Amino acid sequence: MSNEIEAIKDPGLPAHVHRKADTDPVAEKRAERQVAILFLISALGTLLFIFAYYFIPEDVFVFFPVLGNTNAHQLVLGLGLAIALFFIGAAAIHWAKTLMPDEEVIAMRHTMRSDDEDRDALVATVKERAGAAGLGRRSLIKRSMGLSLGLIGLSPLVLLRDLGPLPGDDLTKTSWNAGTRLVTDPGDRPIRPEDLEVGAVAQVLPEHVGEERRHLSDIAKDAVLLIRIRPEEFQLSPERLSWTYDGIIAFSKICSHMGCAVALYEQTTKHLLCPCHQSTFDVPRAAKVIFGPAARPLPQLAITVDSEGYLIAQKPFSEPVGPSFWERSS
Amino acid sequence: MKKISKLRRSAFASPLLLVLALFAIGTTFSVASATTKSELSVEQRSAQIAEGKNIFLKGCSSCHGLNLEGSAIAPSLIGVGAASVDFQVGTGRMPVADLSQQIARKEPVYNEEQTAALAAYVASTSIGPEIPNESMLNYERDGNTAEGGTLFRTNCAMCHNFAGQGGALTQGKYAPTLMGVEPKYIYEAMITGPQAMPVFADKTITPAEKLSIIKWIKAAENEPQLGGAALGRVGPVTEGLLVWTLGLGLLIGVAVWLATKAR
Amino acid sequence: MTARERVTGTVANYVDERTGAAKWMKKNLTKVFPDHWSFLLGEIVLYSFIILLLSGTFLTFWFDPSQREVLYDGSYEPLQGLHMSAAYASTLHISFEIRGGLLMRQIHHWAALIFMAGMVVHLMRVYFTGAFRKPREFNWIIGVGLLTLGIVEGFLGYSLPDDLLSGTGIRIAEAIIQALPVVGSYLAFFAFDGAFPGEAFIPRIFTVHVLLLPGIFLALITVHLMLVWYQKHTQWPGPGRTEKNVVGYPLMPAYMAKAGGFFFIVFGVTAFLGAVASINPVWLYGPYNPGQISAGSQPDWYMGWLDGLVRMAPPLESYIFGYTIPWNILIPGLIVPGILFTGMALYPFIESWITGDKREHHLLDRPRNVPNRTALGVMSLTFMLVALINGGNDIIATTFSLGINQVMWFSRIGIIVLPPIAFVITKRICLSLQRADRELVLHGRETGRLLMLPHGEFVEVHEPISPELAWKLTAHEQAPALELQDVDARGVRRAGGLKNKLRKRISQANAESIAKPTANDLKEIEHH
């Protein structure tokens, strides 16, 4: 700052330059007309809007370049509204720019800080009033007040307790049990191993009994993907191999990362990809994570066939399905 | 152009268009089915297979092997069936032009007759999925759009996107768009599982359900723009792009106009 | 007195006798507002908020915020006969049976995207010009709060229709809640009244979306604007403009007409987008089902960077004493955004700590004159942009024939490498621009005209710049670095030496600049 010898001075606010409309009555009239025309365009826009609302049937489609074959009712209604609004704005701005006073004026600022007198007066007032109330002295009242205020803060927490049940074992349990049949989603048809050829997939759910439709909360845990590959391509531990049936392997479709449905199966690479965050799982290696943010393989469902030859679950999932949570042990 | 486009929405599903569509499909398949084996005599059929073998030996065997056994760069064709050949050759994917991550659809190299011959030859060597005939593909009659939508979202949307626009797979592969794909090829793709696509067997998705899927895809394809430009029907990415370009562009443009001094 | 004047006078008298408004209005109708396009960015946000209130109210007349299952029998054929939530069915009803319903839905959604985009550009303007400096730190913090709440509010709105895309978004939000250590699964069960998705979440977020958050917005925006009003707007440096004054147009009539007109412009542009471009076509997504998914499931753009961070996160999870800590969710979903937004909120205080500047500032900085701040801003934007790109990596991959793995690796590396590079480059550019300013002041403008000197040499004729421009280019201060002593007057090492050293280093880097022309410089030139 020290080297700032006032080399270049503030020349001050430049002189006001008059607009054409300020000096030339013709230009003024022209500007006036322009503003009026803009307002009139807006009025026409509203008429168009009303016309579209009442008189353009909702099932008429008109071809426009870029837009394609577009619903005329929606398009004209919207354009009418857009024109009505936009041109009010354009008219007002044009009016302000061309005809309203445009001389720049200077106003002074005040510092935000209050005067020292005011501050001192405030401090004095606060001290006096607080003293009169005995805030400094009555520590019994202060402490009990602190306690009561602190405690009352808990009441919303108490009240919000009934927002929902405790998780219990809900996150670890699914509808899959020993002997549950695998049925197609949608369609609810049981599946035989021979229904799936090598390279085939099927989206399945546990067989559902009862009148009620499936709850989405159940689907959110139960959805399973069946994949059939050549048995010799598996690279599984003997235990996991025993969970497959004749080259058919079943995985939870609920991503172990954030719970999206992982059903994007590539027959050639035998990779499963989650479209949400691109976690990639290698099917022959028990859905080992080979790319992306997921940290755990997809849980594998042990399957076999029942006496009628339909695919069933050997047992429930051996680990919780879906995204991680604190109480999960691995 | 304008007259056609002025068709009412009701007209979309209306009998007129339906008849037109059926007519178009019908003529396509009447040409195609003229050469299907069901209508061919035994001699014609063996001649067709011989022709197919001839084409195969010239155009395909260098990769797929003289006996369809496949090689390091090409899969075996034993058991792939006529449907697979019809799909791959009919959509121009085979013979392949360049061995990239993904083989894309292009102008077919072989004409319909040659394709049929190739299919007949491959089918004659082993059993595999057959080309669906015209009566099996009457999706307008046998399909249900809403059910097809549910099936589509469960089985297809994860790769082909919610509106059948296609999407990304791993390592540069992609699921192609389904817009404009002929029903026959959609059907064949489901039963044969071309390239990365898995097979959707007839027991897990029944032929009727497959037609429902096709009907839904066609409904999506023919759906006019109900709310203006579709922006590619790929979700919020293009919407965000439009807001930052056109939306803010217009607003800042007006702001600049507003703040410049009039002369 | 005309009749009109008489009526106006009577009304005004009636109001003033009951409110005393005349005094306040007399003063404030002539309040001065500086005029610059970049000062209208905040107005875009304000007006989009009003549009959101209007269009949102319209939508609530028919929207049924319920996850009760219904059978769809509306006019959209491809969904007829399907089971879906009442929320989704009523969204379809608004879109297809209510005239103008789809238009209002689209206006509402476009306005939300403009609202958020406007906030970001407004924030950029305030940041890069130093408008957050004393006395405006409170308004900066309110702004950061509004941005954060805006993201939440937008996400809730995106979630309400209960279509396949929004349901997927809620699924991911649930996973983030569930990932919290110790309390995660409890909070998730409280939020959803049991297991995901349940039937309680949409009614609950509806109340938050239409009542709680808009109320908070209204309160914060009011305070934000009152502070702007009371503190008076900042202004660009220029002839006649000082720290002590404000130069511009009085509220009545020109500024009123312009600002009021701009509201209609913003509404008009939003309505135009709502008319010509489809947004969130929920009927194509289908009703939500946790067993279904679409390729390219993305959030709206203002959450895209968050999704991009989650996508690029390394697959880390800790298992300690039988408990799970999912770092792959916590780091990108909570920790990094938390650090970014906290850092942003604290930035005015950090900068004032570095510069030691505790004075009020009403003149804006030209970004080039504060290279460090500008470079830091560009660095942060680069970070966000890489994250945002990764949030759409699948769409980018298919559009540009790349692999998603390639885009992902570009982002993973780029998010670490590119921001520092952006910092360095921006700082260099700022310093070059300062140098160019200095040249311009000292040697004038290049005219492009060549002149042959008597001895045959060609020189380009330079034209001196106007005193106004010269002032504009030199009006800024160039504060030297802080002189912090490691030892105090008595030679004792001060406490917090390391902190001091850090402050000194940053302060030095911050003060790096090209000296602006001084009187001596100009005099020397004249002598030549």
Image (cartoon, coloured by chain):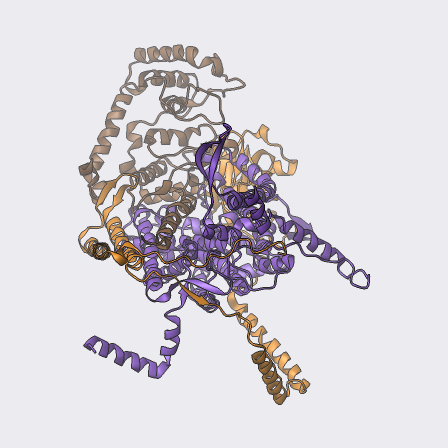
Q: Is residue A176 visible?
A: no
User: In purple, which chain?
Assistant: C
Q: Give left or right: position of B123 versus C152.
A: left
Residue at image position (75%, 58%) is C485
Q: Give left or right: position of A226 versus C112.
A: right
User: In brown, which chain?
Assistant: B
Residue B233 vs A212, above or below: the answer is above
Quadrant of the rendering where the C terminus of chain C is positioned: top right
> Which quadrant of the figure has residue B221?
top left
Q: Position of residue A66 (x, y in %)?
A: 30, 39
Q: Position of residue A270 (x, y in %)?
A: 54, 32
Give the residue at the far bottom of this rendering: A132
Total marks placed: 0
User: In orange, which chain?
Assistant: A
Quadrant of the rendering where the N terminus of chain C is positioned: bottom left
Q: Position of residue C227 (x, y in %)?
A: 48, 67
